[in-house]
Image (cartoon, rainbow, N blue to C red):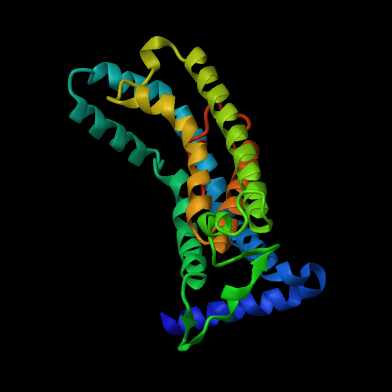
Amino acid sequence: MSSFMSVFASLVAHLASALQPLFAASATAAAIILFTAAVRLLVHPLSRAGARGQRARLKLQPRVAALREKHRKNPEALQKAIMELHREEKVSPLSGCLPMLFQMPAFFLLYHLFSSHSIGGAPNALLGHTLGAAPLSGNAKDALSHGGLLGAQGLVYVALFALVAAVATFNYRRTKRQMAQAAAAAPAGDRPQVPGMAAMSRYMPLMSFMTLFSVAFVPLAAALYVVTSTTWSAVERAVLYRDMPYGAGAALPAL
């Protein structure tokens, strides 16, 4: 693991060096954003596959509704029948989660890299790099202790929070609109009768705002990954799920 982290640290350092003429002292932050974009490009085929899977699940809704009617008094039989239907049609209910799962290693790599004082037995030089005045190894609490919210470091987080809040609001409104359209279009008998689903549907759009907590508590380098990836996801889902009443996982915060 130590040697792998050394290679990754070297990669980030070389990428930052290449971006130095354009971004000066914030070159490492720019390298992290570019690295995030590269990761998102790599997992984009999985995102497209997830959208195709959601379209397939939407086509199966009439058959799922028939199964609910048939097994209305036997939840276990209903669950088994739906799983069998998905298996027969080669539809995975988890396909929409794969992009997030495949990104988690990249997020934890950045988290570990900017939380470790040494890499491969040598001092971690990346800890001294900054975005504006804010160290990439620090977090919002550290920034507030150096000049408060309107200090040089605090203003970096104000900008990040504003961007995250804007993206979360976009996701929230879009998800609420899609869910309302889906509820209005579906006959009462076709609506899911899964225990707890109604409550989850009410609160799911609010999950968009959970990213604010991530940005506040992780190192700034990892927060940059989260903000960039979340913004990418908002645009990507708006395009991939534009013709669907409700895209699977549209409200989930993405890494």
Query: Which of these two is toward me, 69 or 168?
Result: 168
Where residue 196 appears, as percent x and y from the top left, is 30, 26
Where residue 184 appears, as percent x and y from the top left, is 51, 13
Where residue 160 appears, as percent x and y from the top left, is 63, 49
Where residue 37 appears, as percent x and y from the top left, is 64, 59
Relative to 185, residue 139 above or below? below
- Quadrant of the rendering where the N terminus is positioned: bottom left
Using the rendered view, name the quadrant where residue 79 is placed: top left
Relative to 86, residue 64 above or below? above
Task: Name which residue lies at 81% across and 69% down.
Answer: 22
**Going by the image, does 61 lie left or right of 231?**
left
Query: Which of these two is toward me, 96 or 132?
Result: 132
Relative to 44, residue 198 above or below? above
Task: Name which residue lies at 56% across and 31% down.
Answer: 172
**Residue 101 in sight in this render:** yes
Number of numbered discs visible in the structure rendering: 0
Relative to 244, residue 29 above or below? below
